[in-house]
Image (cartoon, grey):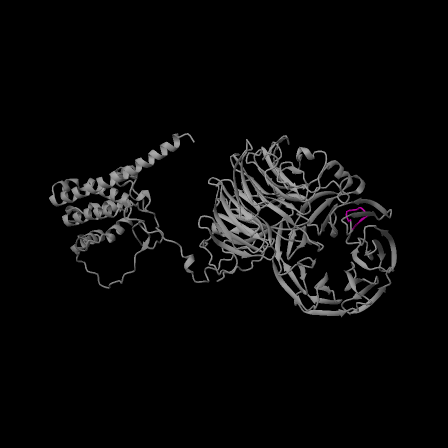
Amino acid sequence: MAREGSGLFAAFRVLGRFSGHVPHVLRYHGRHREFYLALAVGSSVHTYNVSTRRAGNTLPQDITCLAADRMLIFASYDNILHAFARNKEVVHTYEGHKARIHLLQPFGDHVISVDVDNVLIVWNIQSEEEYLQIDFNKATFAVSALLHPSTYLNKILLGSEQGTLQLWNIRSNKLLYSFPGWGLAVTTLEQAPAVDVVAVGLVSGHIIVHNIKFDETLMKFQQDWGPITAISFRTDGHPVMAAGSPVGHIALWDLEEKKLMCQMQDAHSTAVAGMSFVPGEPLLITNGADNALRVWIFDGPGGTGRVLRSRMGHSAPPTKIRYHGLNGEQILSAGQDGTLQSFSTVHEKFNKSLGRGSINKKKSKKKGLKLDTMALPPITAFASEVAHQSDWDGIIACHQGYITCTTWNYQKTSMGAHKLRPEEFSKHKPIDIYATAVDITSCGNFAVIGMSTGQVDVYNMQSGIHRGHYGKEKAHDGAIRGLAVDGLNQLVITAGSEGLIKFWKFKTKDLVYSTELSSSPSGILLHRDSGILGIACDDFTISVLDIETRKIVRTFSGHHGRINDMTFSPDGRWLITSSMDCSIKTWDLPSGCLIDCFLVDSAAVSLTMSPTGDFLASAHVDDLGIYLWSNRSLYSLVSLRPLPADYEPSLVTLPSTCPMQDVDVSGDEEPCDEMIEYVSPEQLGEQLVTLSLLPESRWKNLLNLDIIKKRNKPREPPKVPKSAPFFIPTVPGLIPRYIPPEEENDTQSKVVNLGVLAQKSDFCIHLEEALSTNEYKAPLDLLKSLGPSNIEIELRGLAPEGGGSMEVMLSFLRMIGMMLNKKYNFELAQAYLALFLKLHLRILSSEPNLLEELSKLSKQLEETWIHLRGLFNQSLCVLTYMKSALL
């Protein structure tokens, strides 16, 4: 038995993905009069405008090449080329290449593509047909760069790995000229602002500014950082050329004086993939494979640029993610690149980077990124708290194989003031001892740190002072695998690799309780509000321990790999776990059953659930993004029944960069048994007094209708409008119903039928029938469907002078008796009986049959009320005790 995907979580979108190895494309939109930036991120295309808003377009596979003209964005994956229009839909698809496309060039009404097998195809954009195909010999001319020189009609310039260049006329399919080159492979070609002049980037780091009209070299520059990855020319009046390198540095060359003007070192931590000056503005846009997109502005002295805007995520996969705060809008993420970052689930402009951990920040700034020997290893575990985060540091983190734990300040978006390590290691750093687990108290005052030696220490977050340790020498004989502090700072729970879970008094540091597990724990997680502790074990099982009773209340098994992370739902009902078997499972704690399971392509290394319960966030192996999954139980009907033992989870595609719509397929399928919504019966038990589901307005004011009518009496009679609009006639009542059309008789009788005037109401007829059948459901349902005024009219009509009879009044009293016997619609019975007594008290007092029925009702009412009053008094007594008792 298998269902498609996850029943509980739907793929929503990914955070923290901004750039890849594909160069960006800058295009000008004439109607909008602004520049747009197209950027390939995985299988999606992001489009940014000046204020860096974005829209996402997704292809089936990762994009390998990108280009754009005035109207369309061209993106290719493998050997297929697509064209996007309006930043949304794919309008053209070009298929014909046998190998992966690696070069694209829009060319008027055509687009040129080159694949790795050295086949050049010219496509007609509108008809999607091949206009021309040219095959080059890889041994003599392997195409590595492509450019359309300005003002050169129907001509393209090709660069090769052999170093030669060729100028082709595409319309006539002729080779016009071959440039001998410089004996080195061409990596990039860029049009200079001057006509006939082209900049050629070589694999040796040389930049040749060449006049292709006269085949003359005008200038020659050289960089020592490896091959030229990108070239761009400034067009706002300054003769400057920028060149990128594989190590992330950017060189700015003065073309007038033919010399190096300045260097922008470490613009990116990886190769500069794309670089372009915004035409007519002092703005340079760069992107790289380090997942960063930056806009540099050149407005200072010396010609160097500063970062004006940036969008950046982790340059290496994140290892730990946790929601920060209670609003569910920020996710803290620690990555293998050593940085700690905050990603907003609302908008990426609220993202923050807290930087990289460093032993000495001043020395690190002087040395730069590449030579930074002071940098700390990546963060393996961290804990955060919003209480007092504006007063002092609110984040504590431990680093891979490092004994010192660092504090971080979320408000200042930087590393904190304290470095916490045991006093005995204050002067020297041991090699084989390191911090393994951290936690911070809910008040934000104390941090608890566990070591690989089994030692557990407490530090003050404000001052960084050591406040004691647990145990005589150490808390555990083995390494600390996890620790947690309860919500009231009463208990500290530690888990050791020897298989023990220990409970300590937070203040006195005394051992309270110790319990042994069947297998060594690999990590623990505490849900502070409910006092439930989740324990992941090395035998791939999960144990759930109640810290009040200190007993294991649930044990879950089913994973087939190491359990990477766990997270609780905000109400503590669900425990969600991820494992190296690439599965994400949701366990229902009250029932102790598995209620959801799905597979992903790469194993989730970390999970966190939003404090508001709307999203589940996951980080995956070798993936730079943080993926959001929406909780479907908040907006649709989801089955929470246990999954069968033979359930086979299906593979779910990770979310893309644009928000995904949750496709509801329930309308196309027949509803299965487990999805049928539960309908509560009218009465749960015969001994229970049950109220009706009617609103108070239907019965509460029945005794005060005469007062309400006087108060609502209009001051002036209603005026008939001059031209009344057309209305379809309806039947008066609470539920609007149209009057059914009746057949018109040609001849109408003028004789008045007196029987119509004396016609009984439906309610009277039902009561008369109930005298013989003793079934009062029909008259009761009819009365429940009426409003207060109609109820009063019906009850008035029960008297003989209103068209009723003594038998009908007796039947009504028996209906009330039936309601009291069955103990349902209790408040309606009281209200209807009160109104009946108010209207007909004179008649009731003179009729023996009715008086006898009333005496029976009186006894029933008294017995029921005495029972209810006893229950009310008992509940009030318990509440009073709970309010006044000293806890």
Rendered view: 864 above or below 663: above
Q: Horizontal and vertical percent for residue 530? A: 48, 41
Determine whether, in the image, residue 839 is placed left or right of residue 163: left
Residue 235 colored magenta? yes
The residue drawn where x is 41% and y is 29% is 886
Determine whether, in the image, residue 413 is placed left or right of residue 851: right
Q: Nearer the viewer, residue 149 or 200?
A: 200
Q: Horizontal and vertical percent for residue 446? A: 59, 33
Determine whether, in the image, residue 521 is placed left or right of residue 779: right
Q: Quadrant of residue 60?
A: bottom right
Q: Quadrant of residue 380?
A: top right
Q: Is residue 448 visible?
A: yes
Q: Horizontal and vertical percent for residue 315? A: 68, 49
Q: Horizontal and vertical percent for residue 756? A: 19, 55
Q: Quadrant of the C terminus?
A: top left
Q: Nearer the viewer, residue 84 or 731?
A: 84
Q: Is residue 797 visible?
A: no
Residue 121 colored magenta? no
Identify the magenta region: 234-244
Rendered view: 550 above or below 162: above
Q: Quadrant of residue 96?
A: bottom right
Determine whether, in the image, residue 55 is placed left or right of residue 220: left
Number of marks present in the image shown = 0
